[in-house]
Image (cartoon, rainbow, N blue to C red):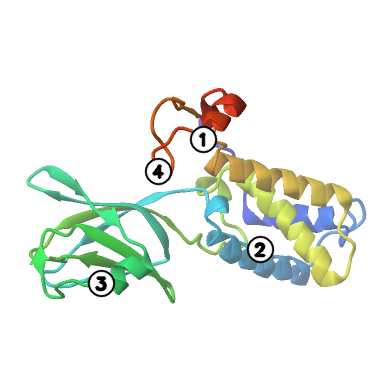
Amino acid sequence: MSALPFVTQQLLTTALYMSGIVAREFETPSDSQVMDALTQLNNIISQKSTVMSLNTYYYPYALVTEPGVESYFIPNLIQPETVTFTLNQVRYSLTKYDFDKYFGTGRINNLQTLPSYWCSVPTLGGATLYLYPLPNIAYDFQIQAKFRLSPVTQFQDLSLTLEQNYWDYLTFALAKRMCILQGFPVPDDVRDELSATESNIRNLMTPLDYTMKRMSTLTRSGRYGVPNPALSQLFEGWFSG
């Protein structure tokens, strides 16, 4: 069963009512108020797109490499999570290198063979993916990554691209921003609900790690490989990880 349509106009008017800028029982938002709210909503979407814990979806991206070419610009890319390629029905994975390790270590610059490492560098309008060694042939790459959210239009059906919890979050975020821009005090319930919805989204994307690792107090560990009797008494052999 498909979700009921939820157009941007509904979000805009709800946020204006929540903010108190428009009285729900006595006023209808004017066209200029709606367009101002739409502008601010897209500003929020642009801002939150780059916050990994508030950007909710991963999407696949297909890339075909060129022999001897190291860098590839990918529009709207924020950060790849996995980078793989397929050769003869076998999928190969690449290891992520941080910026300083990728660009700051010695290597043979023109080495061409199976790529083994990747590094993503933010670039205006997206990001540039670097591969090393350089591809020796054209490979079919598959990238799982987060991308910037697209701007929305006034009568766009948001239910086709966003979950309801994210509509709620954007509604409260917009209500708060409109209050600030218009010089209105932010209602306490708006502030509280915004904090709660944002926390829920962050927890959804980065759940708390409750796993435990069991460590024997008799094994050699630490800097010099010597057991620590004090730790064994304090933690009884259990450490969180």
Of marks 3 and 4, which one's residue comes earlier in the chain?
A: 3
Could you give the CA–CA distance between mark 2 and mark 1, rounded to whole angstroms?
25 Å
Q: Which mark is residue 41?
A: 2
SS category of the residue bearing label 2: helix
The numbered mark at residue 48 is: none
Residue wearing tag 3: 71
Q: At 31% from the left edge and 73% from the top edge, which residue is drawn? A: 104
Which element is circle 1 on?
A: loop
Marks 3 and 1 sit apart, C-alpha to C-alpha, by 41 Å
Q: Which of label 3 and label 4 is nearer to you? A: 4
Judging from the image, what secondary structure is the residue with disc 3 in?
Answer: strand
Count how many numbered circles sit on residues in the image: 4
The residue labelled by disc 4 is: 224
Amino acid at circle 1: Ser
Residues at discs 3 and 4 in contact (Cβ within 8 Å): no
**Counting other residues with Cα less than 10 Å from the Cα at mark 3, is it few (<14), some (14-19), or many (20 or more)?**
some
Mark with earlier residue (4, 1): 1
Q: Residue at x 62, y 62 (%)?
A: 154
User: Seen from this angle, which residue lies furthest right?
Assistant: 26
Instruction: Mark 2 or mark 4: name the one nearer the start of the chain.
Output: 2
User: With 101 as the anchor, is 15 left or right in this view?
Assistant: right
Q: Do tag 2 and tag 4 residues touch (Cβ < 8 Å)? A: no
Q: Amino acid at mark 4?
A: Tyr
Residue 2's tag is 1
